[in-house]
Amino acid sequence: MEHSRIARADELTEVQRIEVASGAPFREIGMIEVADMPPMPLDALAERQRAGRVWVTVDARDRPVAFAVLDVVDGSAHVQQLSVDPAFARRGIGGRLLDQVAGWAAGRGLPALTLTTFRSVPFNGPYYARLGFRELTGDEVTPGLARLLAAEAALGLDPADRIAMRRPVG
């Protein structure tokens, strides 16, 4: 049975491998540019890992099969990346990992998890909605989230299909 914990420094290349592998479902729906995006650089992962903001879900042999990278944006725990190895998809691992990081956030007095995602991709916006996230609209989109959405648009992601979402942790 898998469990989640803070990632070790020696697991960051495996985190990158999972991120690359998790691009496959995007390729299957024709989002080749998204599928081919490079993983988070090792130095950025290492910085977050040292801060205790990279979580992994590991299998029975203690090998990472999923991960979450967290930042703090506008006073909430921001899920910068959540990826599950496609070989372990559809088992509830992502949802359980989000529950773990919600507990981490609550323990630090952070009121919510936030993220940005694709509105129309079934394993993105609709998936997060099933896990208790709600799309933010208008003034609900905080300045930090607005900057993240603008940066994503600058990378070529369709701003009409990108949304910010929030889930209370308490």
Image: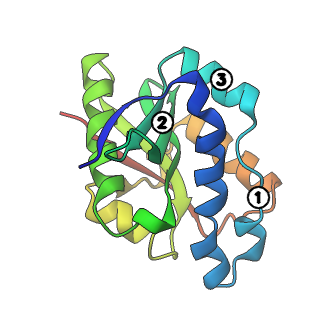
Residue at the far bottom in the pictured view: 29
Disc nearer the start of the sequence (3/2): 3
Q: Secondary structure at mark 1?
A: loop
Return the residue nearer the eye: 145 or 121.
121
**Label 1 is placed on what type of residue?**
Met
Res. 22 image quadrant: bottom right
Q: Which label was assigned to residue 126?
A: none
Return the residue nearer the eye: 11 or 28.
11
Alpha-carbon distance for marks 3 and 1? 19 Å
Reading the image, the residue beneath label 1 is: 37
Q: Secondary structure at mark 2?
A: strand
Reading the image, the residue beneath label 3 is: 46
Return the residue nearer the eye: 86 or 128.
86
Residue at image coords 49%, 25%: 53
Disc nearer the start of the sequence (3/1): 1
Q: Dot 3: few (<14), some (14–19), or many (≥20) neighbours within 10 Å?
A: some
Res. 137 image quadrant: bottom left
92 lies left or right of 41: left
Residue at the far left in the pictured view: 170
